[in-house]
Amino acid sequence: MSGDNVPQGDPGAEPEPKDAGAPRPDAPVPGAVRPEPEPEQTGRQRLAAGLWPPRFSRAQLIVALLLFVLGLGLAIQVRSNSDSSAPLRGARQEDLVRILDELDGRTKRLEDEKQKLDDQRKELQSSSNQAEEARKQTLERERQLGILAGTVAAQGPGITLRITDAKGQVRSDQLLDTLQELRAAGAEAIQINGVRVVAGSYFSDEGGGVAIDGKKITQPYEFRVIGKPQDLEPALNIPGGVVQTMEKEQATVAVTRSAKIVVDALRAAKQPDYARSSSP
């Protein structure tokens, strides 16, 4: 039969793939330059590439600016507190305790004043006869202003300060410093050698003595001061205060507490030339 003459292939041979003559995809192309593989980055290089260049959002920049301003303010505050506390670094422990007591006393006076104002406000709000209550408070306020202006006499607890200046070394500016120290400690009414001292008083050196508001006074200089004795006396004895300053000038200073100090030197009430009340 004709089919018996067809040649049979080797049964164990692999079939020849189609398109055997076509080039393989991975075969090198003659004449082409093969690219060099990129070197693998280390962990440190990847970290540096992630950090630089820095990438900031607008919100992060605003937060950073606010933190900078806050830090600058805190630094200035700390510097200011350090500078203000420098004069006290060399003080003794008992002097620091005395100064602390004085500050506590001033704080207590301010708290008492605040409480009085709060009570007055409550009385005006709750009083059934507000007009009468307002009249009483007006009279009381007028009396207080009269004491401050020196137009009415006053009495109360306080101290007497006597400065004996045998060598005439005490000057007007030192007496003015003494007055300011007493006011800072809570003095409410003061007279010096029969002259009532008020907010507008001035001191000057005159003919071997001191003049207050143009009235000459001679030593010994005697201050009559109404206020809380427990606050007034320590204020004069602080380190570098009135007593130490006067003693450096070889003056003798004596402070006496009293349950009743009378300030009876008066000043004439001055009428304003141009100012008029704006109330109807």
Image (cartoon, rainbow, N blue to C red):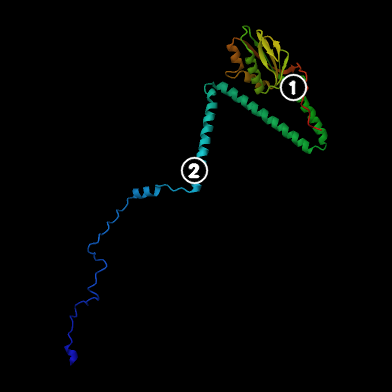
The three-letter amino acid code for the residue at tag 2 is Ala
Q: Residue at x 65, y 19 (%)?
A: 233
Nearer-N-terminus badge (2/1): 2
SS at mark 1? helix
| Residue linked to disc 1 | 149
- In this view, the residue in front, 111 or 78, is 78
- Quarter holding the N terminus is bottom left
SS at mark 2? helix
Q: Quadrant of residue 263?
A: top right
Q: How far from the left and from the top, in percent, is residue 149? A: 74, 22
- In this view, the residue in front, 264 or 69, is 69
Q: How many numbered circles are shown?
A: 2
Callout 1: 10 Å neighbours few (<14), some, many (20+)?
A: many
| Residue linked to disc 2 | 64
Residue found at the far front of this picture: 31
The three-letter amino acid code for the residue at tag 1 is Ala
Q: Residue at x 75, y 36 (%)?
A: 122
- In this view, the residue in front, 148 or 269, is 269
Q: How far from the left and from the top, in percent, is residue 42? A: 32, 50
Quick check: can you spot residue 230? Answer: no
- In this view, the residue in front, 102 or 188, is 188
Q: How far from the left and from the top, in percent, is residue 207? A: 66, 8
Q: Quadrant of residue 8?
A: bottom left
Q: Residue at x 71, y 32 (%)?
A: 115
